[in-house]
Image (cartoon, grey):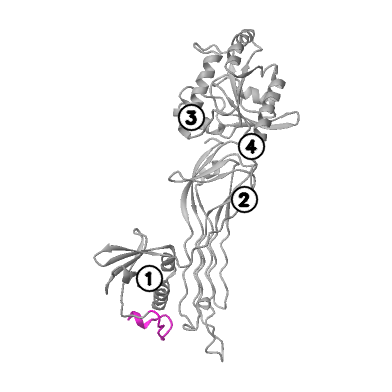
Amino acid sequence: MPDFVDEAVLHVKAGNGGHGCASVHREKFKPLGGPDGGNGGRGGDVVLEVDTQAATLLDYQRRPHRAARNGTPGQGGHRAGANGGDLVLTVPDGTVVTRADGEVIADMVGHGTRLVLARGGSGGLGNAALASKKRKAPGFALKGEEGEGFDVRLEMKTIADVGLVGFPSAGKSSLIAAMSAARPKIADYPFTTLVPNLGVVEAGSVQYVIADVPGLIPGASDGRGLGLEFLRHIERCSTLLHVLDCATYEQGRDPVSDLEALEAELSAYGERAGVDLSDRPRLVALNKVDVPEARDLAELVTPILVERGYQVLEVSAASREGLRELSFALAEQVAAAREAAPVAEPTRIVIRPQMIGDIPFQVVPLGDNTFQVRGDKPARWVRQTDFSNDEAVGYLAERLHRIGIEEELAKAGAAEGAEVRIGTEEDSVVFDWDTSTDAEIVPSGPRGTDARLG
């Protein structure tokens, strides 16, 4: 398996909340000690964090399933459960996070940038927290909620100021090795470069990053060769450098036709990916002019390329001819792009409180005296309920009554014995509606029982 991986599918699961504890204080000579069950601990979050030292998503391809720790249950004596530890996953700078349906969640740029990808479930309340004037010693506690879990796709896009664009064996790796301290693999056969290589170049007061990426061939925008694996890494580059081989012996190849083929692939990829690459400054490096025939060809095509509006430089990675001029020309373009970039505004958190009077649920008639109750709050209350405990079920009925579900059912035409489903259509809990039971009156009786459910 290669050491460089720029795509991975990650299966994340946040920690579940711990269950609350139903406990009564017991001590000699204190028969009525009262409830002392503690709350469950919160489940841990799954957090993504940018680390500039990370250079690949290989670890997530090898181990795609990641889960945070669960919260622990509460205990008697008012002891709350421990919170589950957060799981922090480091990703390379420039990682795009998308859902399974293609929706972009975040573009992770900048060292230390953090994203809470999956939130842990809340811990359930213990019976000490549920005690009230009407129910002084609850014989039940609430269950902890499940943490979020879903699949996401991580896609790494190299962050560089200058992207080197060229055919295989055009000399891009030799060029970046001559201009920077990078040491990419160099050989005399096509597709030597299989992964992006980054190098830092300093020209005067400007320091910038150049990316040497896999070679491009006609049809790359449709996935031929290493096309898509290459093209995504130039999306963030502010300047593009066409490296044209003036010493190639392939039939039908010359710098002008090579440039036209490269531009056609960039345009096709931009349309396909929804990225406008036409506004990026282009420079042309006519490479390998240390070869006499290549120098003659470079002198021949230079006027043609200049007439088309390109800034052309004749260079040789082997003899280092023209590299200083090239580095300063690129620095000028990078500096201009940085100056023209909009100033990042400080992040503002917008709080939109819910309007008073808004109904936190919706009653949908399904026909045949059947109704679906949709809403986050009722669904969450159902998940927190221990249905093996009658008193807990009665408490759920009281909560649903307080937010007006029974009134809305009556308005929707529900009759005695109506089938009421709470939750999503795929995962609902079904109740039979009994209009004769008054949910406002809390009956007395042994803990864990409810006379209304007889």
Could you say where residue 340 lies in the image, as x and y percent from the top left?
65, 34
Callouts 2 and 1 close, C-beta under 8 Å: no
Quick one: label 4, few (<14), some, or many (20+) residues within 10 Å? Answer: few
Looking at the image, is mark 3 or mark 4 nearer the viewer? Answer: 4
| Residue occupying the far right of the picture | 204
Check disc 3 and give the amino acid type: Tyr
Residue identifier under label 4: 341
Residue identifier under label 3: 269
Q: How many marks?
A: 4
Quick one: label 3, few (<14), some, or many (20+) residues within 10 Å? Answer: many
Residue identifier under label 1: 405
Residue identifier under label 2: 347
Whether residue 431 is visible to the viewer of this picture, yes or no, is no
Is 447 within the magenta?
Answer: yes
Decide which of 347, 73 is in the foreground and name it: 347
Could you say where residue 8 lies in the image, as x and y percent from the top left?
50, 42
Callouts 3 and 4 close, C-beta under 8 Å: no
Determine which quarter of the picture holds residue 3: top right
User: Of callouts 3 and 4, which one flags the residue occurring earlier in the amino acid sequence?
Assistant: 3
Q: Which residues are magenta?
A: 439-454
| Residue occupying the far left of the picture | 368
Is 421 within the magenta?
Answer: no
Check disc 1 and give the amino acid type: Ile
Determine which quarter of the picture holds residue 167: top right
Check disc 4 and give the amino acid type: Ala
